[in-house]
Each structure stands twice: as C-alpha cells, then as structure tokens.
Image (cartoon, helix red, strand yellow):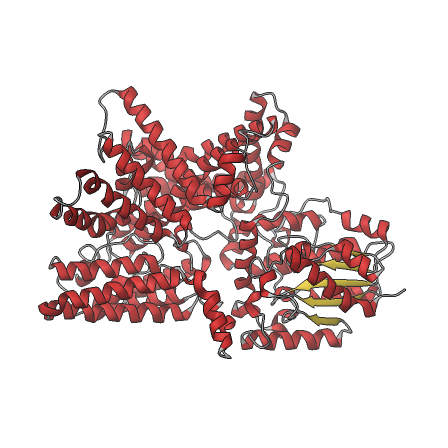
Amino acid sequence: MKLFVRAFFLTSFSLLTLSLILPRVYGQPYPYPLENVNQFDASVKLAPMRRIEEEKPQFVMVGDSVLHDGVDEKLLTQRLGVPALNFGEPGTGSAVWYLIIKNNIEDAPTPPKYIVIFFRDTVLTTPSFRTTGRYFAVVDDYAGKREPLVTEFAYLNSMTPLEKFATRYLPLYTHRWQLRAALDDAMRYPPAALIGCDRRCANQAIYQLGPKELDAVALQQAVFDVDALNAPENLNFKQNLETSFLPAIVEIAKERNIHLIFVRTKSTRFSRPNSEPPALQTYLTDLQNYLAAEQATYIDLAHEERLLDSYFIDLLHLNREGRAVFTEILAEKFAPFVVK
Amino acid sequence: MSFTSYDFIVFFLVFLAAYWLAPAKFRNALLLLGSYIVYGWLAGWHVVVLALATALDYFLALGIAARKDKARLFLWTGIILNVGLLAFFKYYFFFNESLANALNGMGLNGDAFFTKILLPLGLSFYVLKKISYLLDVERGTFKPTRDFIAYAAYVSFFPQVFSGPIDRPQKLLTQLYAPRAWKMENFYQAWTLLVMGFFKKMFIANTTQIIAGQIFELEEPSLLLLIVGGLTYTLQIIADFSSYTDLSRGLAHLLGFETTENFNRPYLALTPGEFWNRWHISLSAWLRDYIFFPLRRFLLKNKTRVSEFWIQSIPPLVTMAVSGLWHGAGWKFIIWGLYYGVLIVLYQALGARGEWKPKEKIKQFFAWLLMFALIVFGWIIFRAISLDWLWQTLTHAPFARSPQEWTASFILLVMVGFYALPLILKMMLDLYAEKNLTLHALYYTAAVLLTILFINSTSPDFIYVQF
C-alpha cells in the first residue's frame, strides 16, 4: 500500500506540473482545442503536380500498393496512346487519395481529363483507414498545415472518448509527438556527433535503411488491413458516406471538370461472383448507385477471370505476369474514354 | 480484443464491477460469460470451437475417472482430438488451397468459406491446458471436476486465453472452486503488474518493433544490420511477451486469482537449459512434464537397446522440436526449436547442464556472453522472413555495405540501449534495492509518464497472440 500511495502522489504531482508547463512551452491553450489534434507540417509533397504539368496526362491513377505495384504506367501509356500516370502510394487509404487530389490535382494548371481511383472493399468510406501510427508520415507528406476535413474525418471521428479527454486535458498526451521527437533527437544526434557525424549525416545514415520497395512483411500487413475494411461498422455505405472523403472528391472533380473513374480491384478473398458477404454486396450496390447518380464511372474488376489466382503473391498483390495482364485489361477498359 | 485496446479497458472496468457486485455463487458463470465475450469479440465462431472442445474434455476426463479399463482409450481420444484441432488450424494455410479447389470442383464456393477460416486466437495455449488436464486426471494427480462451469472458465479464463501463462488445473482450477471476496490486496498486487505491462508494451515493444521491422524487412541486410536487428528483436520480444504476461497476471489478481510467472530474467541464463527454465516458464514446464520426462523415462526403460548418448540427446531434441512446431507451422520454427535442442545436447556433452555455473566471475561473464549471443541468433532465426532469406543473408551479404551502415548501426544500438535501460534498471532495483520504496515509486512514476507519452491511437497486437 505504501508503495502505491507514494507512486500515486509522485505521478499526480508530475502530471500536474507538466500540465502547467507544457501548454506554455508549446504556446497552446489549456484545455487543448480538439481541432488542432493532428499536427501536420506545412510542406506538401507536390511531385504529382509537377509530373502532371510536365506530362499533361489524360489519366491520373490514385490508389495504394495494389496500383503502385500492379499497373505498368509505361505499358498503359503505350497501349492508350496518351499519357497515364500512376500515383499509387503504398500504405495509403482514402485520406491520402483525397489529399493528392485536393493538393496536387485540383491545383494543377492543366488538370487531367480523368482521375482513376483504385479501391477495394469499403476503403472509400473508411476515412481513418491507414492514417495513424506508421501511416501518419504519408498523410503528413501530402497534407498542408491545416486540413480540417482530414482532421475531422480521419482523426476526430475515430478517436475514443478517452483519447479525446486525454487530448484536451492531459498535455503530456496532447504534445506527445513533439516530446517523442525531442527524445528521438536526443538519442540520435548526440551519439552520432561522438563519431563525427552531424545531423545531416545521421539522418542520411538512418534513412538509407528504409525499404525502397514493399517487401513480404509490408505486403502481409496490407493483407491484414483487409479485415479492418470489412468490420461491421464500415459496411453501411449510406451511414458512412457523409463522414467520408468521397463527396469531397466528387465535388473537386466536378469543379475542375474531371471525370471520375472508380476501379474495384480483385483480391483472392472474393474472387468469384457473389462470394462477398451479403453486407458487403449491399454496400457495393449502394456505392454503385451513388457513383451513377454523380455521373462517375464504376469498373468492377473484382471477379475478372483473366486475373488468374496464380498471379497473386498474396490476397491482394500481383506478380510481374499479373501486372502485365492487369495493365492490358485496364488499357482495354480505358480505351473508350481516350480523347485523341 | 487486445488488453491495450480501448474496447477491452471499457469492457474490463464494467465487467470487474459486475463481477464483484454479483453474488459469489454466480462469479464463475460470469467469468465464463466474460471470457466468451472477449474471446468471441473478433469471430463468434471461435467461441463455438472453444466451447465444444471444452465439453469434449470435460466428459472424457469424467470417463477416464469412471472407467479405469477404458482410461487410456479416453485419454488418447482426447489427445488426438486436441492435437488434431491444433494441427488442422495451424497447418490450415498449407492445405486450404487444395481443399478450396476440391470444394470448387464440387460446385461449392470453397474460397468464400476457407478464406474466412483463421487460426482461432489462443488455440495453441488452451489446447495445452486441456491436454494437461486429461493427462493429470489419467495419471491420478488431479481429480476430474464435475463443475462444468468452473472447468469451462478454467479453459477460457480471459486473462490467459490468448497467450497464457499456461496454468495447470492444480494451480488455476482449484482457485475456481474456492470462494473469492474482494480485498484491497488484489489491487495492490495488480497495479505494479499493470503499470509494467502497459509500459513495456507501449514504450519498449512498440518502439523497438519499428527498428527491428525496418531491418528484417530489408531484402538482404548486411551482417552488421542483421546483428543490430537481432539485438533489437531480442529486446522487443521479451518486452512484448513479458508485458502480456504482466497484464494477464494483473488482470487475474483484480479478479482474485494468483497465476504463474512466465519469466525469470531469461537473458541472464548461462546455458540453454537454464534459458528455457527462465523463458516462457509455463510452456517449458508443460513440455518438460509431458514430453521430456516421459520420453526420457521410456528411453531409460529401454536402455539396453539405446545408447547413453541417445538417452541424453533424444529428449531435448524432440522436446525442442515440438516447442518449435508449437510456435508455428513451418520449417523456420522447427529449425529454431531444433537449434535449441542441439545447443542443449552440446552443452550437456561439455558438462554444462541446466543450472551449471562456473565459480570464477570472469568465466561466468564469458559463459553469459556466449549464451546471450546464442539467444540473439536464435531470435534472428525466429524473426527472419524465411529460412531462404536468412541463408542468403548469412552466406552472401557483406559484413557492412557502406560507412553509412556503421553510423546507422551505431545510432540504432544507442537507441536500443536506451529502450533496454528501463528493464535493466528494474532488474537492478529488484535485486539490490528491493526495500527502497521511494526508488520503486519513482520508477513506476516514470513508467506511467513514459507510457502516456508513447501511447498511439492503435497498438500492434502482442507477438505471441499469433501463436
């Protein structure tokens, strides 16, 4: 009991002290306003926009590793006779796709004629999918300093009451990312300095370890993510639509006169017609109806027979042979849209 | 439902209140209900498997006690069914494709059915609990229970069902028979375990996971990076698994139960035998009592036909191979198990059995250093993406690819050292300042603050849950 009492008072005292100090250190009010919850840096990755400006594509494709690894941009461009750019970003979901469209494509001086979004299951209406933990860095890459829609849909809506409470009233929790970064710096740079390596040198040394390509483990991670998309709470299209990025994407496309094409990709999980659970089938019907009402095109390749099971290296991802076949199929599907 | 998830925390607080407010005679039933809710949270059908498997052993054990002439038959039926259940689900991925094809050939949708089948969580753990119950009843060291609720609660006990400890019926089932009343002692025993559990998971395991993951995801790391990755994973796995055990034991205390400690400073071991006496103690004890000793007894009975070398060597080799197989289907785990089997045999041959300890400090240090290096290599096998990957790296990769790798390795080692520090400090406090409450209180305060600092919205599940 004595130990508990001592630890309890020490912890309470420490938390109180930190609650007085930290808001001042970080210049934030107390309690913390929840709308400031995700601290993006000001820089936005604009490489896609630069490519759009340079290559003036008719088709711009957005999606995750299934697109990134599964579609051969050069082959598709060759088959269509017009530029088609692959902006597939591994480890992403609809939050990043929305940000790419909003911060890169919408602002492009010469926008493409078509935005093609590659999706599976309920990812279009699951805004928090792949936005936290190790996925946060990619969201941050494409986000500007303030992204109210992303903050609300991808973060606040998915926070538990306990997290919201801690964010507002526990500055140690609120500012944990900055404090962790400071701690990480303290671990990284002073030891590197001991061996004559400055910050730049230390950063280069660490970053060169990052896997350039998706490997087996990361792919496996993506496979496990599939379960999250099929959780019961994510299967109600009508209920989730308004808190998803889909209406905003449709709106941007309309404003810039871009035609949206949605490609449902194949996975070996639901490779045969009607193999999806009934709730997912209902969801997909609702999605199709919505897209039709918004004059967007829906291409369902989930049961495409030319994509053989043997082409899949796991539930989702295609091997080299499958990539070529998938690209040919896309060329065939996109051909009617090409404006010569 | 992971112990560190919001859903579980809310569930447990509500459950704990209901559990202690309920009349004592309903507590086991409530515990069973709670366990089935937690267990079935992800997939309801897992509960059906668990309940059916539980009922089967319950009746088989009663049969063993009632019909001595059929006891062996009942026992082997139980063992075969339990092991069969484990083998089916563990090896499912190896043969699901051919089964699905066969079903598709018959006009049934095999894909839709089989892709939904995943290894029921905790199966490897509760199957061992059930087998030990049957064996102990058959050996006459434990009387079979007629209280089905208590037995079902023992098998599905939610603080243990996903990753142990694998408590024997003598330890846990007997506590379920006894009446339990709330006392503050339960809380005083629980809180330090809960703090340490969250701290080790959030601060150490989840952070080192990123470093280890980064290295083990490289297509072909250099040997230097492999060593750094191995050291990091060595820290990650003990932090991760021992944090689960701490949380499990803390939760059990809050429910009025005393459960087994699973770790006793395993990385201080001087021999492989000692390592296994200190690591995952409940599994090691299970393997020792139900595989190692019976096999050794059998060989000793037949010693006229088997040489002394094999009498000494076969039990550790078989036991450790089974341990590897228990961890996962695939050669990687079998090789990992056999690696320890061979080490035990080699150490035995050199006269260094389980609790061997040289007198001189310097010899002790080098014996520890060698054993620690062997443990790290064992974890490299365990964590490797595949045996091919490991073989390729060991035989083809250079020691270091560039001066940058030396810099990166140095920085990463400093980081790993930093994250290892809390475990070393705790060990020192327990060994040399056990009675200094202020130091311990300071330690727990720092642990709470660092846990808050390192909480993420989502936390990767515990490593051993997959087994």
Q: Could you tell me which residue is drawn at 66 percent across and 73 percent down? A: A287
Residue reaching furthest front?
A: B305
Residue reaching furthest right?
A: A340
Residue A288, by quadrant, is bottom right
Residue reaching furthest bottom?
A: B107
The quadrant of the picture occupied by the N terminus of chain B is: bottom left
Image: B100 above or below B212: below
Residue B184 at x, y percent in the picture? 26, 52
Q: Could you tell me which residue is drawn at 56 percent across and 29 percent down? A: B400
Q: Could you tell me which residue is drawn at 56 percent across and 73 percent down? A: A276
Image: A34 above or below B402: below
Residue B266 visible in the current orientation:
yes
Residue A332 at x, y percent in the picture? 77, 67
Is residue B381 toward the left or the right of residue A335 in the image?
A: left
Is residue B52 toward the left or the right of residue B408 in the image?
A: left
Residue B118 visible in the current orientation:
no
Instruction: Looking at the picture, tell me which residue is in the foreground, B211 or B343.
Output: B343
Residue B422, by quadrant, is top left
